[in-house]
Image (spheres, grey):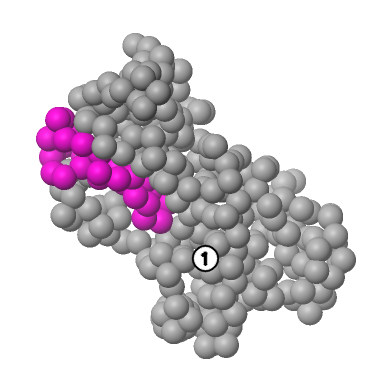
Amino acid sequence: MPEMPEIQAHAERLTERFGGRELSGFTPFNFTALKTAVPAPSTAFGHPLLEVQRRGKYLLLRFEPITFVVHLMQGGRLVADEKRSAKPRGGQARFDFEPIERNDGTIDEAALLLTEQGKERRAGVWCVPTDDALTAPPLDKLGPEAADVTADELAALFAANSMRVHGFLRDQRMIAGIGRRLANEVCHRARVSPFANTRKLGADGAASVAAAIHSCVEEGLQFERTRADMSSSKDRPSAMHSRTGEPCPDCGDAVRAVSYSGYTVNYCPTCQTGGKILADNTTSKFLK
Ligand SMILES: [Zn+2]
């Protein structure tokens, strides 16, 4: 799933390409694509796209009356659609814009298409009044932005929520924008065990984790901004994530894994757990 750096850089590219264009249509291609009944998407027709913003892992297409909040989930993408075919492959919803003449004299008629690969159909669009966009569902329960959270805020959240730190980092109600890859990278950079308890980490632990969040997010953002489109997870730089068995770039110890259904926690024993190897539950009774 794309995380904050991928979504943020994509929002910036979409603003560059579609900012100022007037919305002329909105077409959901199946009944799960539009998650809200009111306000109607047509409320934004005839209005220019002010900006594509980001909050957590959501994209926000801001118009003056209403904002379209888009969640890509695992396999969703929001892409320029030059063909505008009647039934686009994997299409969930399409935003049509009035054609515009570019500086080079060409006419840009591209729409924006929300696609989702796979059968899950979980990507979707919420329509909300722009003034309430950040405080209405689906954004109302999100924690502070990963890039903005301070060491003090994080220490308060750690004290109030007793969780494994890796799970805390992936919980969007705690911190918004971090997923599986960044959670692995942040724990390694902060030199904490992914299974450390947040309450026990204390203020010093919170300060290390906050600093690691900021530097990992900033590095990801710098990488994504060099790209023409959103990276796939195998392209993204990592020290730990998806590196099971490879040497840790900081100490040379082999990167270890603890696997769950759907994701893997990667860590370096020397850097993070005092050399202790954590039980890999893939060898447990569940597989017998
Ligand atoms: Zn290491």
Q: Residue, x 14% and y 30% (percent of image)?
A: 46
Percent x, y for residue 246?
84, 55
- Whether residue 174 appears in magenta in the rendering, the answer is no
Q: Find residue 31 and report its image quarter.
A: top left
Q: Which residues are the magenta region?
A: 36-65
Depth check: 234 or 202 in front?
Answer: 234
Percent x, y for residue 180?
58, 55
Amino acid type of the residue tagged 1 in the rendering: Leu
Q: Residue, x 22% and y 31% (percent of image)?
A: 22
The answer to whether residue 29 shows anywhere in this view is: no
Q: Find residue 241 and report its image quarter.
A: bottom right
Depth check: 12 or 4 in front?
Answer: 12
Depth check: 200 or 101 in front?
Answer: 101
SS for callout 1: helix
Depth check: 168 or 242 in front?
Answer: 242
Percent x, y for residue 122?
40, 37
The residue labelled by disc 1 is 169
- Single out the residue that lies furthest toward the front: 104
Placement of 56 over or under 1, stated as above or below? below
Placement of 65 over or under 253, stated as above or below? above
Q: Residue, x 86% and y 66% (percent of image)?
A: 253
Q: Residue, x 21% and y 36% (percent of image)?
A: 48
- Single out the residue that lies furthest toward the bottom: 203
